[in-house]
Image (cartoon, coloured by chain):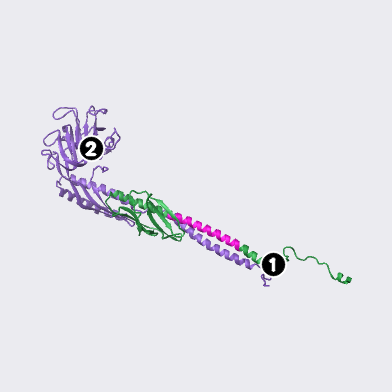
Chain colours: A purple, B green
Amino acid sequence: MADLMSADGSERSRGQMLLVAVLVLAAAFIVLALVVNSAIFTENLATQDDVAGAEEAIEERAAVEDNLEEILRDANHDEEAHFESQIEDRFSSGVNSYEHLERLPQSYRTQIVDVQYTDSYTPGIRIAQNDHERNFTNIEGETSYVLTEGVSKTRDVVFNFTHIDTGSTVGLLTDDPFEMELDDGDNTVIFEASSDSTDFLGVSFDDDQVAYRIGVDGEHAVCVSEEPSGDNPSEVDLTAGTINGEPCEAFQRLQDTGANFEFGANLEDEYQIEFSDAANVEGSYSMIHLDGSTRDDTFESHPDDGDPYEVDAIYDAYISYTYHTHNVAYETDFRVAPGEVQTDD
Amino acid sequence: MTDDTATDIEPTTPTTSFATASRAVSITLNYILVLAIAALLVSGLMLAGGVFVEDQRERVIENELSVIGHHLAGDLEAVDRMVQAGGGDVERAEIDRSFQGSVTGTSYDITLEENPDRVVLTSTTPEVVVEVQVNVDTDIGHDTGELVDGGDMSVQYDPDEEHLVIIDG
């Protein structure tokens, strides 16, 4: 019979089983080390931020759009530029200058931003008056008249009032508020300015204040503000809904219904713009409209002695925008139309 | 019978303890029993250890795929915001990403599904499936038929199909 046990009684056979078991356990630990390493890497990956550049691409686009709106506004308001080609040249060179100016700071931020004017624009008409001491009558001195008709869109409607006088009937003055009306035959938008607290029912204000009322298809809302003067004019921006840069609740939300007011949003194509009781206010104004025509003897053809005038304008322009970083690429075209109310259309 | 035979037998006193007694013990059987018991214990230990390691591995794979999926979902939503900000005139919007090619030693692939919009990540061995929902306004390109392998990839907007896709980078 084989001697299965050594003479001194040692237990080497059992040691071999333990050796096998230990080897298997060591292999299991190695696999566990791989798993733990993966878990640690996962935790590190989870703490990483999103790719840099995605939000910056959108923010940069918004900043570029704001700056180009100012460039377009300046080009349209340039009194030396009366024709579309001149205005377009000024806008195009403004865009090029802006693009060159922004290259170095962008390179510091490891961004490549390219802004190009696409040579595509929509022509419009700008109606304006620059004389702050003149009333809003036309060049014939009429106090109630149609400025333009057949208009499809209006933007950047800004009044700078230096005087509002309602309640007197001396000369051209009337006791009715100054009124601007947009009317397409079925729908209306009315803007009124008055210094007489009896003009707007339910609204009271002091003698050193004035009231501005917005009416949309018969629903009205009023904002009260300090009375303007030559040294302290009031800037009323109808399309932005602000008075002297501050939001006017009435311009942005009709108090009766709570609906949001968007200037001209309720009008269909081809409406007319009309002034009434235009002698009751003094100051300057400007607006740009798309399509439409003015009647003869309403405006001068260029700025002249402070009389109201109409000139060519760029209603909107199209820009090509490109943004690149190491991980992000964004290319899009967008439209520049400063002061235009965005509707749901 | 003589008395001499009876007088030749001398009484014996015990000289071995119970522990070292080897009467009625088979050495072979002893050896086999020890081996069998040891083998049972070791195999049981190995089985339990293997199950434990495999279970931990699946959990880590699931965690890794979840993290990668959430990063991709964030990129999809970022590209969607770029598309929405462009107002329909976007020609190109993409975010490039680089993840590890395998998770805990196994490869994985990525697809997009809709209803609800989600990113689906599937590992090869073991097969672990992770879904991460995304909230986007742009359509998801779910029917491209392509499986994207893990590693370098790109989240893009396809202006021709007007939908978001993930492709190999």
The image quadrant where one finds the C terminus of chain B is bottom left
Give the residue pinned by disc 2. Answer: A235
Q: Chain of mark 2?
A: A
Left or right? Give the position of B120 relative to A69: right
Point out the residue furthest to the bottom here.
A1
The image quadrant where one finds the N terminus of chain B is bottom right
Foreground residue, B159 or A101?
B159
Q: Amino acid at mark 1?
A: Ser
Q: Look at the numbered disc 1 and give the secondary structure of its residue.
A: loop
- Identity of the residue drawn at 80% across and 65% down: B13
Where is residue A114? Give x, y as percent. 26, 54
Where is residue A174? Give x, y as percent. 16, 29
- Mark 1 and mark 2, same subunit? no
Where is residue A248? Give x, y as percent. 27, 36
Tell me: residue B112, above or below residue A18: above
Tell me: residue A200, above or below residue A15: above
Where is residue A58? Give x, y as percent. 31, 50
Q: Which stretch is magenta?
A: B39-65
Q: Amino acid at mark 2?
A: Glu
Give the residue pinned by disc 1. Answer: B26
Crowdedness near tag 1: few (<14), some (14–19) or many (≥20) residues, C-alpha within 10 Å: few
- Identity of the residue drawn at 65% across and 64% down: B33
- Identity of the residue drawn at 75% across and 65% down: B16
For residue A156, what is the image quadrant? top left
Inter-mark Cα distance, 1 to 2: 114 Å
Foreground residue, A185 or A172?
A185
